[in-house]
Image (spheres, rainbow, N blue to C red):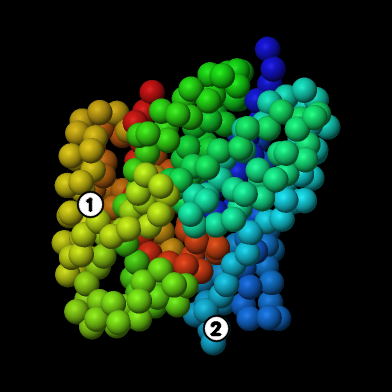
Amino acid sequence: MGKVRVVTDSTSDIPKSLVEELNIAVVPLKVLFGEQETYEDGVTIQAKEFYENLATSDVIPSTSQPSPYQFEEVYKEIDTEDQGCDIISIHISSKLSGTFQSAVIASDVVKETINVTVVDSKRAAYSCGMIVTEIAKLAKQGATKEQCLSRLNELLKDTTIYFMVDTLEFLQKNGRIGKASAVLGSLLKIKPILSLNEDGEVYPVDKVRGQKKALAKIYDYLEKDYGNQPIIVGVIHANTIELATEIMTEMRSRFNISSEVFTDIGPVIGAHVGPGAIGITVTLAK
């Protein structure tokens, strides 16, 4: 029975304790503050430091994907450690980043000697990370590649994310919404409830005035989606742990939670959504 190893990228925002426990290989993206400061997401800059830098920086940071060579090196390193293992490489939506394409190119380079299956999660942040984590748990239990891919298909179908941003400035400056919409939304204190569609693109689910009303809407959506079925929950936040804690408390009171994770929105995703963003990601437990 062949061993399975799981690879992802740093935008999955998986807590380091889980990365280590489940032996997940994480390929970092980069965050750039202007032309002078370049950091590797989760390696040379962590979430706390990123949001501190963001608060004092005069520039909106930009991001860049890993090169195919970075993925190639990771695949080769895994093959050296576990010769003959199957690699499942799961990544941020191809509609949001070129990371998936870099992984595909690398897998093609090594295909003669290393068996790599590259998957577009069509998700971002911990909605991708949750999928990665569940597959890595199966792999650790000794599941075959076929068993892992079967569960992966279920997770891709069942995993949902709803998120909100505290300010529309970052989405506007990164080209996700127009300037007029950002200014008007900020003036009216409108909180767009955002999600990812089946193609992996960000879209507005609803527009609500005020955070409490927006959260109430999200809980309603999740109740409609999942009812009383056992679920896995991830609450993700960009430097807003108190709100994240309140949300998890509310989720516990409303839903049949099998397991739960708190995690930071890391530097790369944080560069696009800004501080104060909050998200809830859910999938069916098995």
Q: Residue furthest top?
A: 1
Q: Amino acid at mark 2?
A: Val
Q: Position of residue 82 (x, y in %)?
A: 77, 27
Give the CA separation, mark 1 to mark 2: 32 Å
Where is 284 relative to 66, above or below? above
User: What is the residue that sits farthest to the right in this orientation?
Assistant: 80
Q: Amino acid at mark 1?
A: Ile
Q: Which mark is first along the chain, 2 or 1?
A: 2
User: Which numbered dot is residue 259?
Assistant: none
Q: Which residue is mark 1?
A: 218
> Which mark, residue 59?
2
Above/below status of 216 relative to 136:
below
Residue at image location 17% in from the left, 47% down from the top: 220
| Label 1 SS | helix
Nearer to me, 90 or 267: 90
Name of the residue lying farthest toward the bottom = 58
User: Residue 91's quadrant in the figure?
Assistant: top right
Residue at x 42% of width, y 49% of height: 200
